[in-house]
Structure formats: structure tokens, C-alpha cells
Image: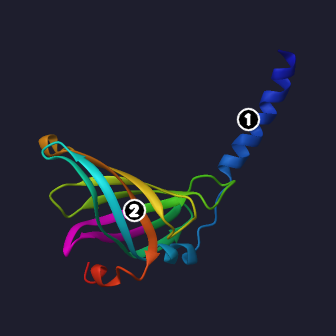
Amino acid sequence: VSMLTKVLPVVFLLVGTAVAEPFNYTNEMAQDFVGSQHWFESGLYANSGLLEHYDGYFCLCNCDATPEGVFCSGAGVSGSEKVASFLGVFAVNDILNPRKWEGDLVAFDNTKPFADKFYMEEGPGSGSYYVGVSQSLEEKSFVWRGKMEGVSCEGKESCKGV
């Protein structure tokens, strides 16, 4: 027991220092998010059941770096229709591995509000996995999981005007 009382405070101090260390978000990182990303997802809908492997484009139009993370706005497109407008925030989730980012996005300006959680393994603008959930839609509720391919010029035309 006496060994633990000597070692644990040092361990907690080291862990607390690593977690509290600030990360320097830059405008260059923020601009790496800007552009279109092709997405594929499957979802389970309360009113229509399972839909598999449908796709569209995720368009981030403006992103800015702050000391707390990268804040973005944009929209989603499926086919030729705008799905929703987005607000999102992205940040490093492990300062010991600054290539691992995560983000949260909220959709608005649509009839089916939802939120997505993103997990990026390779940093800003890279491919990512995400999970989405509807917000208070009762019989129209849904959940989904999908993959973004990363920012590219492929869907640039789909993102015009959103």
C-alpha cells in the first residue's frame, strides 16, 4: 500500500499534464477540412426499416481554427437535393497521436434534424467513419453509420450553391 501511495500521485500528475496540454489548431488545418467528401452509409429508420449503402456528398464551405478546435459550416447533398445545413466542430482527441481527430456535427434547416459523430484516423480532411442519430422524431427516428472518403474535387459540382 505504501508503494501505491507514492507512485499513484506521480502517475495522476503525468496523465493530468498530458491531457491538459493545449493543442495548436491552425488555419492551415482548418482549410484542410474545406471541400467535398463522398459518403456512403446504411441506416435503420423507424418508419421504413433498413436502408443499405446509399450515398451523397458532405460539403464543408467555411472552417476556422480557434484555440479550442476547428469550427465549420456547410451542407449535405444526396443526389441533387440538399439534405441539411451543418455546423461542426473538430478537434484532436489524443494529443499523444495528433493524427487522430474527432468531430461533432449538427444538422439544421431541414425536416429531420440529426447529429453526427466523426472519427478521423489521419487528420483534417482525411477519410472518416461516422455515426448519426435523429433528434426527437418519434416514429420517424433513425440511426446510421457511414464512411467519408476524404476531401477531393470529385464532388465539387454537387456542393455548388449549398
- Residue 54 against residue 16 in the figure, above or below: below
Q: In this view, does 79 lie to the left or right of 75?
A: left
Residue 78 in the magenta stretch? The answer is yes
Looking at the image, residue 50 sits to the left or right of residue 7; the answer is left
Indicate the position of residue 63 as horizontal and vertical percent values.
44, 73
Q: Name the residue under label 2.
A: 88
User: Residue 51, how many percent across, how many down?
Assistant: 22, 52
Left or right: where 3 falls relative to 34: right
Residue 135 seen in the current view = no
Residue 114 lies in magenta, yes or no? no
Q: Which quadrant of the rendered structure holds the C terminus? A: bottom left
First along the sequence among labels 1 and 2: 1
Residue depicted at x 69% and y 53%: 96
Q: Mark 1 points at which residue?
A: 12
Q: Mark yes or no: residue 21 visible.
A: yes
Q: What residue type is labelled 1?
A: Phe
Which structural element holds mark 2? strand
Q: Real-space Cα distance between discs 1 and 2? A: 32 Å
| Quarter-of-image position of residue 129 | bottom left
Q: Quadrant of the N terminus?
A: top right
Q: What stretch is highlighted in magenta?
A: 72-88
In percent of width and height, residue 28 lies at: 57, 78
124 displayed left or right of 34: right
